[in-house]
Amino acid sequence: DTGVSQDPRHKITKRGQNVTFRCDPISEHNRLYWYRQTLGQGPEFLTYFQNEAQLEKSRLLSDRFSAERPKGSFSTLEIQRTEQGDSAMYLCASTSAGQGNQPQHFGDGTRLSIL
Amino acid sequence: AQKITQTQPGMFVQEKEAVTLDCTYDTSDQSYGLFWYKQPSSGEMIFLIYQGSYDEQNATEGRYSLNFQKARKSANLVISASQLGDSAMYFCAMREYNNAGNMLTFGGGTRLMVKP
């Protein structure tokens, strides 16, 4: 039983570079969520997909952030022109739609450090 | 206004004793769910327990139980017989069912430290 997988686990990059993270959800889950967690805080919601449709993206932090889930399976989160303030843990979660008591299952996260 | 408030930044508990982690929430919805997650230092978020707003009984999962007081809008996590491996961050989260995406709103977390 594979869980949510995120790649890479850690990413160190220079300010101004573009970065892309990948998330593979649990295979039977049709909903996929991205969250950001800064040091000492709880995760904050960024965006989510139901199958391949991105149904909520107003919480993406700026137009430098974008996400895709082209075939309704894995998803990518891209940050363009990274800034120091983008340093954080980026978490992906998945669940099945329709049953509100089902928990979101999280991956181990990608920790981004901007030099 | 904060939707989820966890007022205890850090807590100590003696091994084998019980501990209560506080969580209060704010919503005008009638239908919502409350979740607790554990986050060890390695970073993964581990689901612990769920309470629905219409559930009449407090949820229990092994050593975890949820003290749900709807009128007070509180959903405190009780961990019985603490173990050293319980040392971690604990997050309370709410899912409001009137938002189509059912995304979670998290509190700021409580760091629990279990003393041997």
Image: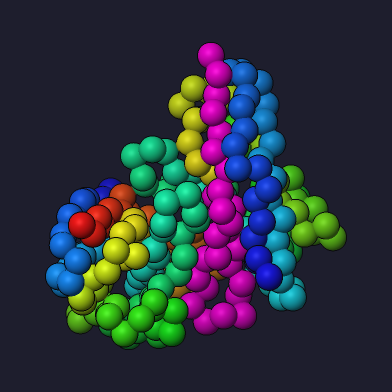
Considering depth in this image, is B56 or A108 the residue closer to the camera?
A108
* x 18%, y 72%: residue: A16
* x 42%, y 51%: residue: A39
Q: Is residue B9 above or below residue A60?
A: above
Q: Is residue A65 above or below residue B105?
A: below
Side of B65 where B109 appears, left or right: left
Residue A6 seen in render: no
Q: Residue furthest right?
A: B71
Residue B97 position within the rendered picture, expressed as x and y whole percent measured from the top left? 60, 75
Q: Is residue B113 magenta?
A: yes
Q: Quadrant of the C terminus of chain A?
A: bottom left
Side of A29 where A18 appears, left or right: left
Q: Residue furthest top?
A: B116
Residue B82 position within the rendered picture, expressed as x and y whole percent measured from the top left? 58, 24
* x 43%, y 84%: residue: A58
Start-end of magenta stretch = B91-116
Q: Is residue A109 magenta?
A: no
Considering depth in this image, is B15 or A31 the residue closer to the camera?
B15
Residue A29 position within the rendered picture, expressed as x and y whole percent measured from the top left? 35, 67
Side of B49 where A1 appears, left or right: left
* x 77%, y 59%: residue: B73
Residue A92 position within the rendered picture, expressed as x and y whole percent measured from the top left? 34, 62
Q: Picture quarter containing residue B30?
A: bottom right
Residue B71 seen in render: yes
Considering depth in this image, is B10 or B26 the residue closer to the camera?
B10
